[in-house]
Image (cartoon, coloured by chain):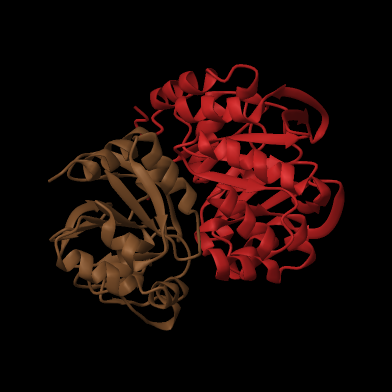
Amino acid sequence: MKVAVCDYGAGNVRSVLAAFARLDADVSVADTPAAVAAADLAVLPGVGSAASAMGVLRERGLDEALRARVAGGGPTLGICLGLQLALEQSDEDGGVQGLGLLPGRAVRLHEGRVPRIGWATVDPGGEAYYFAHSYVAETPAASAISEGIVAEARVASFVGVQFHPEKSGAAGARFLKRCLSPV
Amino acid sequence: MPLPRLIPCLDVAGGRVVKGVRFENLRDVGDPVELGAAYSDAGADELVFLDVKATLDARPALLELVGRVAERLAIPFTVGGGVRSTADGASLLRAGADKVSVNTAALARPTLISELANLLGSQAVVVAIDAAEGKAMSHAGTEPTGRSAVDWAREAEERGAGEILLTSMNADGTRAGYDLELTAAVAAAVSVPVIASGGAGSARHVAEALAVAQAALLASILHERPGRLASLRQELHGLGVPLRDAA
């Protein structure tokens, strides 16, 4: 199973690589459209700001590569900011146009302490995963919820999660393993 | 609200984990890679690594050590000590940290907080405050700044801090309980998560801290017997603290 982790020059790509390596996946960094196209699973990780991340994705042609991949039914996983970038629009950084892989937009969190940081239960499933975010997806494609916010959204071959499976211990490893098993 | 977090803290000097009392008389308590992995496996919710004697010339060795600790962790990892610039912060994240913690350099130049938040995102920026008698101290607790810890926490949040790590130097290493009054005052002053630090001696102390803060840092209480983390989680469950199921 070849896993390609999109590199857009920010954040901790290394922890995503390490998490897939622990599952014995053949994982590597992808910074070209060809590498994104060739993988069995493409991962759009997420740390950093929406505007700079989208800028680098465009500059490297990874935005088109991801759209083409999902249009062709290629399994693709977005993590945290990777979920928010997959939406049509984000309110972050004064408004950023997203990849449009998922309907909806990313909006600022207003309830509780922000950033929302820590482990929270996700339903269905009832497992706790680690979250660290100030924006949240508003989308009709939600497939799992945590404390009233969208924890996971799916359309066709794309799945996006707001939590960090690569930082979520045994529960996170189980989630990533499911992403690696053919559907 | 997310679940309360238990965060073991590795104070590292010269490549080893050390622990003192009220920041003094540091003793060697183990290897950071081994201790970090043991805590990750025993159900720690996060790990904090503070390079307590951070010096610029030791930077490459520190990054290498951070990388080796990070490789063994499947939980969030915060690293601090000597972070003076966005380049320092970015290199720690590249080495495997998920968040960076700043203290002295932010007191000297508060715009560092917003620079780090703009580059890395607020969720990756922890402002650590060492407080003695309610006042923020700099240079690993050796120099008074005269600033109230509560006011400094509020300013840090305004500048983009995503979390406040509040250590009471009066309580540090004493195992006599957290400084609940100061912790509650800081938690009331900011709307970002607050991590209480200094003074944990029993499960009850930790439960008290988690009633006013979102996370509790643990050091002395664990290091002599890392297996204590699992029993501590059980005792906290018994006290009604809703921790995650780490299995």
Q: Position of residue B163 (x, y in %)?
A: 56, 55
Q: Residue B179 is drawn in which quadrant?
A: top right
Front-most of residues A96 and B144: A96
Front-most of residues A152 and B214: A152
> Going 69% across and 67% down the picture, which residue do you hit?
B112
> Going 24% across and 51% down the picture, which residue do you hit?
A40
Residue A115 higher or lower than B65, as above or below: below
Q: Position of residue A151 (x, y in %)?
A: 27, 54
Whether residue A83 sits left or right of residue B73 in the image: it is left
Q: Position of residue A166 (x, y in %)?
A: 39, 44
Residue B136 higher or lower than B120, as above or below: above
Q: Position of residue A41 (x, y in %)?
A: 26, 52
Chain B, colour shown:
red
Front-most of residues A94 and A15: A15
Quadrant the N terminus of chain A occupies: top left
Residue B85 higher or lower than A131, as above or below: below
* Figure chain in brown: A
> Going 68% across and 42% down the picture, which residue do you hit?
B50
Q: Residue A43 is drawn in which quadrant?
A: bottom left
Res B39 seen here: yes
Res B185 seen here: no
